[in-house]
Amino acid sequence: MDLIKIIRENKLIYLKLDSLTKELMKTTGESQNDLKLQINSLINEGTLYLDEQNKISISADKGYFKAKITLNRKGYGFAKVEGYPDFFVPAFAINGAYDGDDCLVEIISRKNDDEIEGKVVKVLHHNTTHIVGTYIIGKSKNVVFPDDEKLPQIRILKNNSKNAKNNEKVWVELDADTLDTKDVCGKIVEILGQANTPKAEQLSIIRSFKLIDQFDTETLKEARAISQIVDKNQYKQRLDFTSQRVITIDGEDARDFDDAIAVEKTDYGYKLYVHIADVSEYVKENSHLDKEAFKRGTSVYFSNQVIPMLPKELSNGVCSLSEGVDRLVLSVVIDLNNNCDVVDSKIVEAVIHSHHRMTYTEIKNILEGDKFLIEKYQDVYNDILIYQEMSRKLLKKRHDRGEIRMNIPEPYILENESGEIVSIEKRVQDEAHQIIESLMILTNECVAKTFFDLKIPFVYRVHEKPDSEKVLRLSELLQNMGVANQLQIDGDKPISYQKIIESIKDNPSETTLTKLILRSMMKARYTPICLGHFGLASEYYCHFTSPIRRYPDLMIHRIIKSYLNGVPKQDLKLKYTTIVSRASEQSSETEKIADEAEREVDDYKKAVYMTKFIGEQFVGTISGVQEFGIFVELDNGVEGLVRLEDLPSDEYEFDERAMTLKGAKHHYTIGDSVRVIVANANTRLRQIDFDLVGVEKNTLGSFVVKKKDKRSKKLDMRTAKISKAKNSKRKKRR
């Protein structure tokens, strides 16, 4: 029964609950209690609206939209409304909503289809149930100040304090009945440690992102019941590859090994064997292990800690392709000609025995002629040269089809055993990394194409074409920076981006420009629809090679094994069509959360590290320009902000499209080299402030914002004098 249709057709609006119920009883014949339950449900979900006079109307007819709110630290936010671009919600129009809440919003201003301003009419559901913060014992009351500045302080009664001490980081459960009041209350459910200590701060981030760092009893019970020795009975149904020269290649600090390789030179080219841990043999569908893996979606990696998707009994035990032990695998056997074109490929269940656990550093040194390592690995030395030969050919093939290879060194945080950050340095992928990357990309493509052709439900890894508006903006920005490009004509072709990246190679601003290109692109995600991978210029792609740490890989292993074991295609379609959609959506979301958490921990550790260098000078590159200042990245990858008020006195104009701040005397744009002083490193906010070297900041100018429509709006930021005494105090605080 469609109550909304009945209400609309019979014009039963602006009636109180009892009156509306009686009218609907006449029309529908439903009971009073049933109708009241249905009406209240529609009110709670936002389809019906209950006003201050307790009168009911249809939300959509009043111009109210259901939305999820995302708030900024400064108080404003955005409302995500289905079928519309995000509404901007100014601070005065938040009306008690918290970050992540489900709300009803209305449009209060609309310049065009892309610039809509909204207002929260009603909070439908508060989605914030727990917060992380610092416990402060006061004279009149005890409170928790949330790490997330968008949230209000939380009052903690003594009997809800869990005996926490002053200035401890805590995990707080909010009292739902107080969320819409000025005095929000809660109870401490976990004490995380003393504030501003690395362990407590990292745990705070883990809790704030709702990452699960412990396994429940049932999951652990299942994991511990699995034998760490491979069942010999399994060998009968599998190909025996235990005599192959199988090796694994990973980083020195790798804890689990889910891929191994072997190779043979043939008369026509190569026969490559890529062996992937058969995790689905141990993680059975709908088991506690499976449900927990689905919930987590991915392992999460910090510089000093891993939150695994699976318990260590599997991730570091029977599923890990460790040296010197037999392991069950799904193997992709690929025949290639001398040009590394795929002639044939097949997927089989097998058993392997890894002969060597090798590292990227060892492979790199062997390729550079290290005699000691060549002798140590004499039995696989020729194989390593074949892998190098294949990788170079595969790399060229991907280049020729338009693959976008971005040379963005990743900051690596090195800590000692006591958790102290020793250094932060950039690390670039070398040829050893490229070998494994090339072989895994090839394997993922072969698997994806096989199951696309079979028309069996599957989880694909897709990277869609960039948004046309972002392409246009990037093209204009690059041209303004002197980088010629064809993006306005061929922005939907990967090779256009490849040519730009090649043209800026060895440019002093190469890393900054490459990051701009990366930001203009779509984010890769999981989906049951094969949409190709733009960055790889690949028509078919999936994630098959890491089932220990990614749920999509485990999901498709299960599908592959079902097919290999003779389950009819029609049965596979009936069973997996819905499941792959759920797995794709869940895994895309958990991957996003993991990325954000990893970035947040890195930002905290960068801030901690830079506290050692307050007052010291560095040379950096402008990596971002905003109306509130310029971001500067140092050679080690640490980024900080030079605030607008700390720039030289001038009247500035911000050009959003050119990404420049330009004054009468000063001009700042992306890619410029500048010398900065580390002014402050705020570990709580995970932010670093820089000052420009040699800048007098006695007075500040005004600021001009250039809007998209080319009109400019002048904003007086500050014109008052700043005394030398105030500047002196500021420097002492730092």
Image (tube, grey):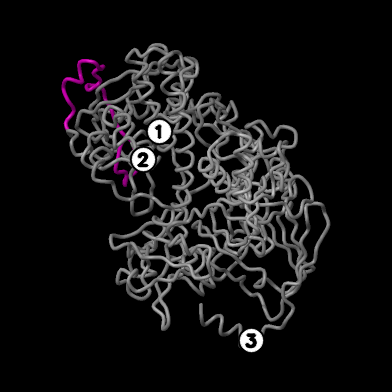
Question: In the structure shown, which secondary structural element does the residue marked by tag 1 occupy?
Answer: helix
Give how far across and how far down residue 3 sits, in percent. 61, 37
x, y (%) of residue 474?
Answer: 69, 44
Q: What element carries label 2?
A: helix
Left or right: 310 in relation to 544: left
10 Å neighbourhood of mark 3: few (<14), some, or many (≥20)? few
Assess whether mark 1 and mark 2 are in contact (beta carbons under 8 angstroms): yes
Q: In this view, does 517 lie to the left or right of 199?
A: right
Numbered mark located on residue 724 in the image: 3
Q: Distance between the residues labelled 3 and 1?
A: 58 Å
SS at mark 3 in the image: helix
Q: Residue at x 36, y 71 (%)?
A: 168
Crowd rating for badge 1 (residues with CA inside 10 Å; few <14, some 14–19, many 20+):
many
Q: Does the magenta stretch include residue 251?
A: yes
Residue, disc 1: 436
Residue that carries the numbered disc 2 in the rendered image: 360
In the rendered view, would you say 588 is above or below 713?
above
The amino acid beneath tag 2 is Tyr
What's the residue at 31%, 47% (across, down)? 253
Mark 2 to mark 1 CA distance (whole Å): 9 Å
Q: In which quarter of the image is residue 160?
A: bottom left
Q: Of tags 2 and 1, which is closer to the observer?
A: 1
Which label sits in the foreground, 2 or 3? Answer: 3
Q: Where is the N terminus found, in terms of image quarters?
A: top right
**Residue range of the region highlighted in magenta in the rendering:** 229-257
For badge 3, the amino acid type reads Lys
- From this viewpoint, is residue 505 visible? no
Depth check: give the residue in front, 308 or 645. Answer: 308
Point out the tag, 3 or 1, that comes first from the N-terminus.
Answer: 1
- In the image, is residue 591 above or below residue 75? above
Callout 1 amino acid: Ile
Look at 66% across and 34% down and name the residue there.
496
